[in-house]
Image (cartoon, rainbow, N blue to C red):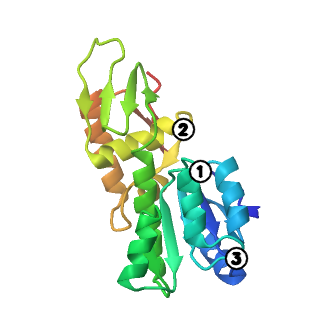
Amino acid sequence: MTTSETTAPRVLLVEDDRQLAEMLSALLIEEGYQVTIAPDGQRGLHAALTLEFEVLIIDRGIPVLEGLDLLRALRGRAVNTPALVLTARGTLADRVEGLDAGAEDYLVKPFEIPELLARVRALHRRHLTAVAALPVGARLLVPASRTVVDPGGRTDEVALSERECALLTVLARSPRQVFTRQQLLELVFDRADTGGTVDTYVHYLRRKLGRTAVDTVRGVGYRLGTR
């Protein structure tokens, strides 16, 4: 089991094909993910139970513990991290079985790399909207309801769009980190979007939450507001 030395978000890749695992790991690292590789289901189970991940990528045909059995074991232990199952089995019955086992997505081999990366981004966004409340200044962000609330009841609840919530969640989970526009594009938005999209949604957040909600670090990018 190996882990890359980069920052979050974290992906667990359970794949016994060493060449494919190394290729996918390199691609994911280029996208800004931290990748842990487990070459069989038993080691994948151990990793998922002892470490925290934002996305699971599980090959169905892995040794020791088959991919769907691994997924069922994780769901039975209340590990609800979004999972993408990779498989050579592409019938409707196979896809239904994978989804019923607890997978959020199912991708048939051979697949196109841009599609795989897009699906991983979508699962990461799903994870971001499922985390617990996060401090945002004196208020709390509740990703599950896409709202910002004031525990003291001094200000009204603020509703956020899906993208606004995803962007604020990334910032709030790492309040001291400065994110470049490119990092935010990869973590929150679609590949077709541009840096201007990030600026637009920062503007939306400031309009709803106040100008100090997001700080601009000139020449670098954005971080959560310090006030």
| Label ID, residue 75 | none
What percent of the width, then of the height, locates residue 22? 68, 76
Q: Is residue 33 visible?
A: no
Secondary-structure class at tag 2? loop
Q: Amino acid at mark 3?
A: Pro
Q: Residue at x 53, y 54 (%)?
A: 75
Q: Nearer the viewer, mark 1 or mark 3?
A: 3
**Considering depth in this image, is 175 or 141 the residue closer to the camera?**
141
Q: Amino acid at mark 2?
A: Ser
Residue tagged by mark 3?
Answer: 63
Q: Is residue 23 visible?
A: yes
Label 2, label 1: how many angstroms apart (C-alpha)? 10 Å
Residue tagged by mark 1?
Answer: 8
**First reached walking from the N terminus: tag 1 or tag 3:** 1
Residue farthest toward the right in the current orientation of the protein: 1
Q: Residue at x 57, y 76 (%)?
A: 60
**Considering depth in this image, is 138 or 82 the residue closer to the camera?**
82
Other-residue count near label 3 (Cα within 10 Å), few / some / many at <14 / 14–19 / ≥20: some
